[in-house]
Amino acid sequence: MENKMIQIVLVALAFVFAFSNNGLCREFHVSAVTGSNQNTGDAQYPLKTIQAAAERVLPGDKVIVHAGVYRERVNPIQGGTEKQPIIFQAAEGEKVEIKGSEVIKKWKHVNRHTWMVKIPNSFFQKFNPYSDTIYGDWLERGSWSHTGNVYLEGKPLKEVPTLDSLVFVGYNKPLWFTKVEQDTTYIWANFIGQNPNIKEVEINVRQSVFYPEKPFVNYIHVRGFYMSHAATPWAPPTAEQPGLVGTHWSKGWVIENNVVSFSKCVGITLGKYGDEWDNRSESAEAFVNTTKRALQNKWNKENIGSHIVRGNTISHCGQAGIAGSLGAIFSTVCENEIHNIGLDQPFWGYEIAGIKFHAPVDMLISHNHIHHTEGGIWLDWMAQGTHVTRNLLHDNKVQDFSLEVNHGPILVDHNIFLSPGLAQIKLSQGVSFVHNIIAWKIWPTGTKDDRQTPYLLPHDTEIVGLHDCPCGNVSYYNNLFLRVDMTPYNNCVLPVRMSGNLYLSKAIPSAKDENFQKDALSDDKFQIVHEEDGWYLCVNVNKEWKQPRNIISVKDLGKADIPNQTFQQKGIPALFNKDYIGCKRKDKKLYPGAIEFKNTGIQKIRVF
């Protein structure tokens, strides 16, 4: 009886303690160090886990998490509203880590650098990452890989497919191997002279770190956390897309100022729900059907998308930094730094990039810094009303930019693309490139892709029809080309417009470009240098680059012919009269490319 009375008092206090000054919203405090889930959750009596707070909050409430390491998966139960979101944030000035891993001890030495540990399968409860392999649509190799991982002092070891390749062939390399039997999970690992029972060894245990189990948990804010170590699955466009952090088919999330790292597949997902067709739809026709089913599952502006992903650092993910199929409509992705994505992984497929979106309808991708990834920005299918502006990309292994079978309009302006790889851009229509610095080369595809892909009502998700993807309906204005060969545009099916572009010594103009500038003497050494206070572009500016050029207006871009949609929409300027760093172009002589240089000769300009 006494215990029951205490519980009643605690519940009552939970509703009284945390009202803020406006009397409307409550604050819950969480402390891994001093908290208890039996507490009320005020600043004096904090909860111990973030999940305990997630199960108490209502629209308008705020969860303040204090310094510590939280080894849990946060599953938001209740969503907020547009005016009263539910906010989860790290306490100001405190480092809060949320991890999908657990520390593992009781390793036994096998020989040389190899150690082994036995873990009861009951330890993993409902989900064992060491019996869960990477699989799904458009995965090409590495299906033996597991979603689990092993970390020594924060650094991941690399999985191998056989025990022999670890113990004998790779005994002097940081590798791991696993085998799961009926009751026990075995993990072998090479720790290269380190004792894993003294050092910190962690293994992935949870599939996600911050991800709602059910869809339509709307208006959640997640800010200021360090989140890592998730056993995330391969995330194709045709299946549910759990990420280390993810929105799970919802609306109005804000994910900002977090450090997200070491997701097996994707760091942040703005993705699709799951159904019985997951990973059974690897074809163009099947993805069209996936889109039609999404329309039946509330794929529209009223229910899905309109997220903000801002100011995050995302790194060391196997598939993508940020990804989403269908669920990212009307969203903004800006000011993020994304690096070390898709590199040195035992698995590979056609979904690897720093940013990878399917159907980024009316989406803004701006001021992101993407480097040291397999690929930079990849917009795949139904990019319509998409604006890619003022992003910095360099040192990416395969490509900086890819547009696959889209009908537009897609506006690409004031970006700095400095990786020399191939760009898959030729077979998307309704694309305008304005004032970019471009080092990539164009993937030499044919004149048409026969895949029938959807086009939509302007600023909507309703499918109007399907169309193949012929080359053309593209414009290039006032760009600076370092080494690109533009001759693939000479024989396009649809019209091509080019004007005001500068071609440096290794770049080749298209026959379609009748008003271009050629500088055969200048080199193509545009370098990015990292210093303590930021990233800098170093370039030798020729005064002859500044020539009479028109300031381009959005009306000059025409329209995307297949969806019959102009480039004019909210957020796109009427005139492109401000450069990458916001300086205004003032006279009739303009520099090509992203930056309106103030001086000539060797210049060093901060770009991130």
Image (tube, grey):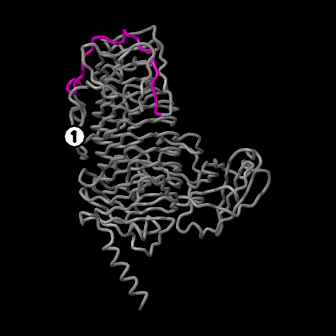
- Name the residue at 39% across, 73% down: 40
> Which quadrant is the N terminus positioned in?
bottom left
Which stretch appears magenta? 533-557
Q: Residues within 10 Å of mark 1 (few under 14, many from 20)?
A: some
Residue 496 visible to the viewer:
yes
Q: Is residue 143 above or below residue 109?
A: above
Residue 93 position within the rendered picture, expressed as x and y whole percent measured from the top left = 44, 52
Residue that sits furthest to the right in the current view: 111
Quadrant of res 13: bottom left
Residue 526 position within the rendered picture, expressed as x and y whole percent measured from the top left = 47, 21
How many marks on residues?
1
Q: Is residue 242 above or below residue 597?
A: below
Does residue 132 appear left or right of residue 288 in this picture?
Answer: right
Q: Is residue 480 above or below residue 215?
A: above
- The three-letter amino acid code for the residue at tag 1 is Pro
Camera-nearest residue between 14 and 426:
14
Residue 286 visible to the viewer:
no
Residue 24 position within the rendered picture, expressed as x and y whole percent measured from the top left = 24, 65
Camera-nearest residue between 439 and 402:
439
Does residue 212 appear left or right of residue 457 in this picture?
Answer: right
Q: Is residue 545 magenta?
A: yes
Residue 367 position within the rendered picture, expressed as x and y whole percent measured from the top left = 37, 35
Residue beneath label 1, please? Answer: 458
Q: Is residue 517 magenta?
A: no
- Name the residue at 50% across, 65% down: 32
Q: Is residue 566 above or below residue 272?
A: above
Quadrant of res 345: top right
> Which quadrant is the C terminus positioned in?
top left
Camera-nearest residue between 447 and 338:
338
Camera-nearest residue between 442 and 367:
367
Element class at badge 1: loop
